[in-house]
Amino acid sequence: MTARRSTAANRSVRRVSGGRSARPRERREMIVAAAAELFHTKGFRATRIEDIGAAVGMTGPALYRHFESKEALLTELLERYWQRAAHDTRVARQGRTPRETLRLMMRAAVTHVVDDGPLVATARTQLAHLPPAARRRIERRHRAIVDQWVDGILAVRDDVDAEEARVIAIGISAMVTAAAQEPISSREKIIERLTRMAMAALFAR
């Protein structure tokens, strides 16, 4: 079986040979992808700027031309994650029925986890390392998205209140994130499987 780590982000990390010759925008993308992987596997504190630079064929000092600090790099990572999550949620809410809307939201969330596992894991575990202002901004975005999930759940479950719907949303999110780490042979297969599993859990009584 092939591991699910053959994602766009991880392909960027592997383009080490292009680190010096890549254009500035490409370098920045490579740095972001490498940082997501390293923050996920080593943790924010244990990862040095030099480690990130080495992963993309750059020196540590050269990396500072793109990001002023490790905290700034983490901030951009988390901003990207929540921007995509917000966009995917808005698109999914165009479903024709409440149940279809919820399924589209679930599939979008599952796809994000499958395609960008290290980024998703970093967004969920490294928030405490952000500067206070950035952390508050990210927390507001997180709450706004969870609120939309709560609304979606309440639209299809009349047997739960808002607090219970929030617990359900957070629990299913954690379940999907953990399950997506397993090796797979087909991206589409795991997306469909996890979406079905999450929807089944959502309607479990």
Image: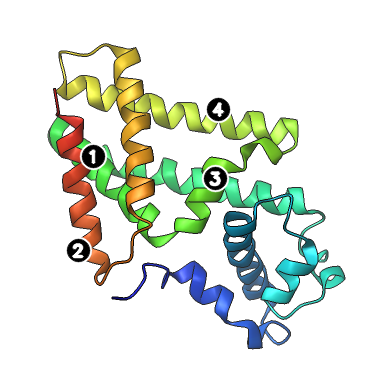
- Evaluate whether residue 110 shows in this view: yes
For disc 1, the marked residue is 94
Residue at the disc numbered 2: 189
Q: Does label 4 or label 2 sit earlier along the sequence?
A: 4
Q: Amino acid at mark 3?
A: Ala
Q: Nearer the viewer, mark 4 or mark 2?
A: 2
**Residue topped by disc 3:** 123
Count neighbours of disc 2 (C-alpha within 10 A) and say few if under 14, some if 14 to 19, many if 20 or more. Answer: few
Residue at 27 percent of width and 37 percent of height: 93
Residue type pointed to by label 2: Lys
Residue 147 drawn above or below residue 116: above
Q: Which quarter of the figure has residue 90?
A: top left
The secondary element bearing badge 4 is classed as: helix
Q: Which amino acid type is marked by label 4?
A: Arg
SS under mark 2: helix
The mark that comes first in sequence, 3 or 1, is 1
Identify the residue at image location x=14%, y=33%: 99
Marks 4 and 2 sit apart, C-alpha to C-alpha, by 33 Å
Q: Nearer the viewer, residue 152 or 55?
A: 55
Q: CA distance from mark 2 to mark 1?
A: 24 Å
Label 3 or label 2, whichever comes before in sequence order: 3
Alpha carbon distance from label 3 to label 1: 26 Å
**Which tag, 4 or 3, sits closer to the chain's start?**
3
Distance Cα–Cα, label 4 vs label 1: 23 Å
Q: Amino acid at mark 1?
A: Gln
For marks 4 and 3, give the CA distance.
14 Å
- Given residues 85 and 40, the one toward you in this image is 40
Q: Residue at x 66, y 35 (%)?
A: 128
